[in-house]
Image: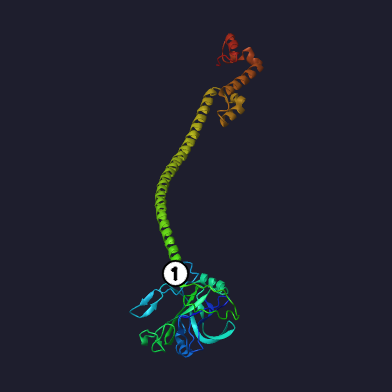
Amino acid sequence: MTNIKYFELSKKNSKSGKRKIKMALLEIHSKADDTNDNGLHWKKEYIMNNIDTAEGMPICCEFADETKSVPLGHGYTGIDSAENIPLFENSEVVGSISKAYPEFVEIEGKKKEVLIGEGWLYQQRYPEFVKWLSDNMEKGNVFSSIEITGKPENDNNIVYEEDEPLEDMRTAKEFAFSGTAILSVEPADKSAVILQLNNKTKESEKNIMDEKTINLIAETVRKTVEDILAENKKNEETSDTLNKTIEEKTNEISTLNDEIAKVRKAIEELEKERDEWYVERQALEQKIGTLKAEQRLAEMDKAIENFTDEQKEYAKEEIEEFKKDPEKVEINSIVSKIYEEIGKKAFANKEYRSGIYSEVNDVTEKEAEKISDIYSDIY
């Protein structure tokens, strides 16, 4: 694997949720004895013979945590013995290379030829990673590392130019570019170099870490993940207890609501009965009032039945008032008024006072004198 530290990232989302990226995939060696720190010699002839395999290869990241913002390594998990290929099951595909070509760039004042890869990052799916990449490119904290495998016709084995390739000197001749990983740490082979960034030569700080440091970071991440999982389990148990309590309280509330509904229904029935009773009571009161009025009228008629119509006219107003409101006017006052007027008429009539009624009614003078008393019997 070759590690190159060179990126150009467009300022804005440029295509349907994707962000354009330009990156150096590897350094093409001009001298026959040049190698990267991993002992691999990149010969331009062989790169160009296999460059078609770089088009469409994935850009990958092994993320440090669930936020998917900070990349670590390749995410290597082992070898598939059946297929004879390396596995990177702990990494995710965050983009792809659309084309690759050689280009000269300036490195530490010297022009060097590199293999450039242009492609896209899936910003819509990894917004935090793209933000981290934008923030850290200028700081020199971003690396790339190319991944190659053998071709199927060679049983997925890389074919080297040398008959006996050495660990510190070997030239890949027949191979396939299988992917490139974006890293936040420089691997132990220390083959990363600082190239041109955004068309300006820049001396950046190197965030160099050896395998021991990487393992320490990985252990810290693992411990953090375990702590998070343990806390999540504890929270789940607490959540289960709370859910059980909530369920019990919900059942209690449901029971209380049923009781409240029954009480409300009983109150509604009582209110309905009360309203019906009020209606009946009002009707009875009206009937009783009518009967009382009729009784009082009958009593008044009985009290004045022996008076003539002329005599009844003496208390006409009182009789009319009585008929309007029998409870308001006393019957005795009506009778008294009639008697009062009769008495007045009698005393005003001289013939009446001298006993004319005795001749008319064929009575004695003594009886006539007796009749002259308005409170005596009337014949």
| Residue 291, placed above or below residue 376 | below
Q: In which quadrant is the N terminus drawn?
A: bottom left
Q: Secondary structure at mark 1?
A: helix
Residue 37 percent across, percent down from the top left: 48, 80
Q: In which quadrant is the C terminus drawn?
A: top right
Residue 31 percent across, percent down from the top left: 50, 89
Examine the image and state in which quarter residue 204 appears. bottom right
Residue situated in front as seen by the camera: 121 or 298 = 121
Whether residue 310 sits left or right of residue 57 in the image: it is right
Examine the image and state in which quarter residue 377 appears. top right
Residue 228 percent across, percent down from the top left: 44, 61
At horizontal 52% and vertical 30% (from top left) the residue drawn is 293
| Residue 263, placed above or below residue 56 | above
Q: Which residue is mark 1?
A: 215
Residue situated in front as seen by the camera: 271 or 283 = 271
At horizontal 62% and vertical 24% (from top left) the residue drawn is 314
